[in-house]
Image: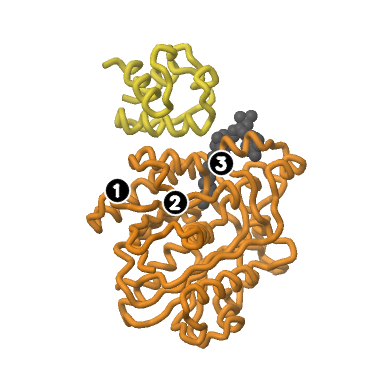
Chain colours: A orange, B yellow
Amino acid sequence: MSFSILGTGSALPERVVTNEELSHMVDTSDAWIRTRTGIRERRVCSSETVTELACQAAAKALTDSGCTAAELDLIICATISADYATPSMACILQDKLGAHCPAFDINAACTGFLYALDIAAGYFARKADQKILVVAAEAMSRLIDWQDRSTCVLFGDGAGAAVLGAGDGLLAIRTGAKGSIAPLYAPSSWGNSPFYTGNSAQPYLVMEGQEVFRFAVTSMVQTVEDVLAQTGVRKEELAWVLPHQANIRIIDAALSRLKIGSEKCLTNIADHGNTSAACAAILLDEANRAGKLKKGDLLAMTAFGGGLTTGACILRWDK
Amino acid sequence: MSTLDKVVEILVEAKDLEADKITEASTWDDLGLDSLDTVELVMNMEDAFGISLEMTEDMKTVGDVVKAIDAAK
Ligand SMILES: CC(C)(COP(=O)(O)OP(=O)(O)OC[C@H]1O[C@@H](n2cnc3c(N)ncnc32)[C@H](O)[C@@H]1OP(=O)(O)O)[C@@H](O)C(=O)NCCC(=O)NCCS
């Protein structure tokens, strides 16, 4: 019931939006955003679509893995901000990449990449020798209210992907949920139904920052402890921790509780902000491309997000 | 150990503060702590005292937190 990562890829929109630029749009400042979140700038879609970003990330991951699209047995996309409700992002990728396999999307908000890896592990349990493409891509810029300073400064757009193949690199994975709307939600629109009598909410993301902060710190600590215990891997044996990039303050608080030094932690929040499900996949790809991952390295990935969802895994880098 | 001593210990450990600079009258501002530091500290207090604590607007000083902890015990 395991796999190894054969290749990774990522893609970001061209347009950079700095804190300084945001301070002209809403009542905020570079200093506030940096100290409260660790974010300096983020990328935001302008002319490109999130499907295009997903496609680029997937193509790079295929190249990195040495596989062709025709070899793929499954495509899973994790997203809450796809261009279409249907066809799924995964089906569009199947067409654009030239694959012939089944394809579907999943929604686990910021934990989407880890949920997708967990689903993939189930497919590998059924058939060990296959190739699965997992993509996480988000245009959070379409979900946030650009007039709400408490949320619009936090998010960014981007896509990351990984090609999975036969192997035993996934040592443990655990996903969880604590279903609740209030802490973090983004309503779907009712379109123009003349029959619907409820309130038509704006499709903007709403968040109770401090409640999510507490959930995030607690769940990061717990899920990492869980997967470590499950594998018997000791903290000292981890080469890198790849946490969800929502807020550097969450990461710092969780690391200090876990007693893991920040030098073991990979981050890119300063440059990208929170790209929801894509965070984990982009972070992994950037580390791969920067040559930071050595064969045999043990990685702990952890995420939390709307749902509320949580997840963590221990991966051995086999590339 | 008094509640105050324990709270001071938590502040020193979590936020690298100097113990002798912390008094019951110290505000979060005095200690250079922002709203996210206080959220984190409330979590630490809950763990340390085994209580559940709500951070409210009128908890402005270390003394206010000590009182709230004693009331929750
Ligand atoms: C969002 C978050 C950074 C806000 O930090 P916070 O300390 O909780 O901030 P608060 O909401 O208490 O606001 C503190 C003050 O800053 C103000 N503020 C909020 N956003 C601001 C901004 N962008 N710029 C300047 N001031 C801002 C508030 O209005 C408030 O002002 P007041 O004290 O005068 O009322 C923080 O709660 C957080 O990161 N939570 C987790 C969110 C998360 O991870 N979400 C993604 C999940 S996948």
How crowded is the residue under tag 2: few (<14 C-alpha within 10 Å), some, or many (20+)? many
Tag 1 residue: A235
Q: CA distance from mark 2 to mark 1?
A: 14 Å
Instruction: Tell me whether circle 1 and circle 3 mark residues in contact (CB < 8 Å).
Output: no
Mark 2 and ligand 1: say if the CB distance to the nearest ligand atom is below 8 Å. no
Quadrant in which residue B57 is drawn: top right
Q: CA distance from mark 2 to mark 3?
A: 14 Å
Judged from the image, the secondary structure of the residue bearing numbered disc 1 is helix
Q: Name the spot of residue A284 as percent of width and height, x first.
A: 47, 60
Tag 3 residue: A38
Tell which quarter ligand 1 is in. top right
Of mark 2 and mark 1, the one earlier in the sequence is 1
Q: Name the spot of residue A238 as percent of width and height, x first.
A: 32, 52
Of mark 1 and mark 3, the one earlier in the sequence is 3
Mark 1 and ligand 1: say if the CB distance to the nearest ligand atom is below 8 Å. no
Judged from the image, the secondary structure of the residue bearing numbered disc 3 is loop
- Which residue sits at x=48%, y=14%? B26
Chain designation of label 1: A
Q: Name the spot of residue B54 as percent of width and height, x first.
A: 44, 31
Tag 2 residue: A243
| On-image quarter of the N terminus of chain B | top left
